[in-house]
Image (cartoon, helix red, strand yellow):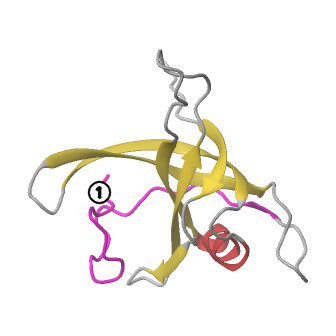
Amino acid sequence: MSSLNQCSFIGRLGRDPDLVYTPEGKPLARFSLAVDSEGKTATGEKYPPLWLTITCWDRLAEVVYKYARKGSLVFVQGRLQVRPYLDRTGVERTAVGISASTVKFLSSPRAGETSTEAHAAGEDLPDVLDPDAYPQEFSEIR
């Protein structure tokens, strides 16, 4: 039986992307994405946004790092990745993220720049990313 792991989101960057290189020299960019939720709670309050960690590789990582900024509205398409990690206090948590294959910029570019649509072929994550190359609360583990 065939399977499909593909998802799409439109949201705003919660921070500027970070760009690092793996020990093999592959570019890796990461940013947080806030996706607004529809509707309101029983008390009339708006639902909080869904926060996702977006990971981009290779040329897509470089383009996202160059053009995307905190608050940019983007369309992201890629593979859903769910993995456990230990937080700083030792409590096991679950990280939900997207390994992006497409990032499309929907908001106006910064002054003097042109709008860009970036596509890159999705690639498998390495088994373990060198923690010194990109310190985070969790490492990229398949």
Vertical comparison of 29 with 38: above or below: below
- Does residue 31 appear to the left or right of 68 in the view shown? left
Expressed as whole percent of the image width and height from the top left, the position of residue 99 reads 51, 53
Q: Kindly indicate the quadrant of the structure image that contains residue 137.
A: bottom left
Residue 21 visible? The answer is yes
As drawn, is 94 to the left or to the right of 54? left
What residue occupies the far front of the structure in this picture?
Answer: 43
**Range shown magenta:** 117-142
Residue 27 visible here:
no
Q: Examine the residues drawn in magenta and state their main secondary structure.
A: loop
The residue singled out by tag 1 in the image is 141
Q: Tell which residue pokes out farthest to the left in this image.
A: 90
Asked if 12 appears above or below 58 in the picture, the reply is above
Residue 126 percent coordinates (x, y): 37, 64
- Tell me, yes or no, whether the highlighted magenta stretch contains residue 70: no
Q: How many marks?
A: 1
Residue at image location 32% in from the left, 52% down from the top: 142
Residue closest to the eye, 88 or 1: 88
Q: Is residue 140 magenta?
A: yes
Q: Which residue appears at 63% of the width and 76% of the height?
A: 65
From this view, report whether residue 34 is shown above or below residue 41.
below
Look at 31% across and 76% down and name the residue there: 135
Q: Which amino acid lies under the numbered mark 1 shown in the image of this protein? A: Ile
The residue drawn where x is 33% and y is 61% is: 140
Q: Position of residue 72 (x, y in %)?
A: 71, 61
- Considering depth in this image, is 124 or 30 the residue closer to the camera? 30
Whole-percent x, y for residue 4 in the image: 54, 29
Mark 1 Cα shell of 10 Å, populated few (<14), some (14-19), many (≥20): some
Callout 1 secondary element: loop
